[in-house]
Amino acid sequence: MDRRGFTLVELIIGMVLAAIVGVAIYQALVNSQRVYQMQTERAAMNSNTRTAIALLPMELREMSATDDVESDVVRAEPGYVEYKAMRGLFFVCSTPSATSVTVWSADSLAFGLRTTVTAGQDGIVVFSEGSPGSRGDNDWIHAEVTAVATGTACPGGQPSMTLTISSVDPSGGMSGVRVGAPLRTYEQLKVGTYSAGGSTWLGAQVHDGSAYGGIQPVLGPLKDGDGLVLTYFDSTGATTTDEADVVRIGLRIVGQTSRPVYNAGDLRAVVDTLITSVALRNNRR
Amino acid sequence: MLERANNERGVALVVSIFAMVVIGALVAAAFFVGMQEQRVGRNTIRLQQALAAAEEGVARRIAVWNPAVSNRIAVGSKLAFSDTVSNGGGWYRGEVLRIDSMMFLVSAEGFSPDSSARQRVGMLARLRPVELTILASLETQGAVDANGTITITGENGNPDDWGPSGQGLCSQPTDTLPGVRTPEADSVSQQGNTDVSGLPDVEEDASINDSTLTWFGDTPFDELQSLATLYLPSGGSYQNVQPALSGTVCNYADDHNWGEPNYSGVGPNAPVAVCQDYYPVVFSNGDLTVNGNRGQGLLIVRGDLNIQGGFEWAGPILVKGTVSFAGTGNKVMGGVIAANVVTADDASSLSGTADLFYSSCAIERATAFGATAWPLRERAWVNLY
């Protein structure tokens, strides 16, 4: 029986070789994991910034800042924006009164993101024709919704939604509203950044009629300090702080990975920036 | 000499395979993440393509608004449309929904070229008829020389076969307007077999000035061009204006097709039924000469209008300069405004045989059916999701 083993030299050489191979494998594993982590984090960050750059313009472009009564841009700040977010489109089905208006609520005649109306929270703007032959006197009447009742009050017993309204502006404006006039519902939102868990996030708050409610997280994380930068431009292309002069909003979103990742040898959070510009499609022409 | 061990199997192969599996898994995961990222990016592009397609659908539908088709949609009814976007940019389908007599919702659902992404937008559009107030069969700021077999009457009437006993397009009017309305009654010269009638025959209104007859609501004369559905260059001369077919449908592309006012007739006057709902807004960007045959709608001339004979027209005629009727067989059912603001000293002349009849029904139909739709001035765009 052969009982001879390895010599010391053989053993040392073997261990050294094994160590070299082991270190190489470990390095490869670590590098692969870092690349994987970085890609995952970057993908999540890109997804965040892309979502923001798709979501915000969709909301903002539907505003009118030039409304005679009040701009849809309620407050224009670099770090956040308060605005009237359009939610539904309906059409008036019977002659309105000073305190109520009835619209078709059938699916075929109700449009938009949300075809329900929340009393106390939602507002409306309704088209006032003025003289049929003139565009110059066309207007939108503003009001707040205090109660909602569904029924079949539209012609032919069609499904209807009757909105009890208050704070009509301009006062008496409902007298110029005709059957068939478009009526748009909105909710007031505040969209901006907030801090939580040591990171900066994009969040939204809905105005319930008296104050803004709790923050609803939208996406993130964003870069601390300047993760969201809004710039407001007037018709001359100059920046403005007057909500009624806004014709375009510049958006700069700086996304950030949720944890530090190795990038070019450094362990740090990676940021990336997307920039876009949104023209307010519903300004007066 | 050392003997080799019987069992020389080590762990290198196992370790190598393990490492390769682990590294392979990480590489595959990284590749998967990369693929996902690429897909998300591609989806974003497709979403934008779909949005652009929807936007084009709405914009194009309003830009090429055909009053003869779209203005006939009944209230509450829809008209479907679809098309592709140029350069392979996707496609769209949509509908024009008539809300009331004036208001429409044009909506379009846009798709990316591979139909994997969809977006829907809408536009509130409203008919924009010319705000016309015609107060006589012929209104002018300048002189009128009528010499021939000329009839100008302010008695409100209907074009042949349009009334209750015919097609029922018009009610039977009973009112009578002035035959001619002018700042100076003495400037209307009636010779030959000229018959000017109305209440009064000639109304003198010294307040008529350059703007009286060249502003229509809040629209000045030159801006009427934006309402045109048929644009004619300055100095155009058109013979044998009459309805035309393209196959079995009315040929809206033919610039000699100005609609069909006839509901009876034979030979060349036989009605072309498919053009009876076509009321073009014909805009001539300067002087215009017409020689036969017929049409309907709104005729706007940014210079002088010269009618040489055999021309019958149902609807209003708005002329920035003067009108001249010559030859035989000329007839206007509607109303004529000759503003005389191009060359103030020029006079409008009527010779040969010409009938100018006031018709409120012809005016109303021409303005209502010929009106094009425009997006509301404000809050027209709707995201329909």
Image (cartoon, coloured by chain):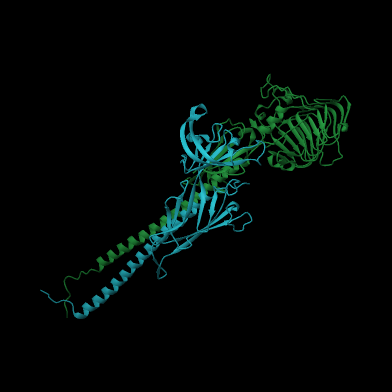
Q: Is residue B289 something that shows in the picture?
A: yes
Residue B344 in picture, x, y percent from top left: 85, 40
* Residue drawn at the location 26% of the way across and 76% of the way down: A16
Q: Which chain does the green colour mark?
A: B
Q: How far across and down, in percent of the image, does residue B328 sit?
A: 83, 27
Left or right side of B32 for B371:
right
Looking at this view, is B122 or A134 the one in front? A134
> Measured from the top left, where is residue B181 in percent x and y?
81, 31
**Res A257 → quadrant:** bottom left
Q: In the picture, residue B241 is in which quadrant?
A: top right
Left of A16 or right of it: where is B129?
A: right
Q: Nearer the viewer, residue B233 or B145?
A: B145
* Residue A5 image-quadrant placement: bottom left
A270 relative to B128, above or below: below
Question: Can residue B82 be seen by looking at this rendering?
Answer: no
> Which quarter of the figure is the N terminus of chain B placed in?
bottom left
Q: Farthest residue in the right direction?
A: B191
Q: Is residue B26 above or below residue A149?
A: below
**Residue B244: horizontal and vertical position, in percent?**
69, 32
Compare residues B319 and A61 and report the one nearer the observer.
A61
Is A27 above or below relative to B279? below
The hue of chain A in the figure is cyan
Q: Is residue A72 above or below residue B34?
A: above
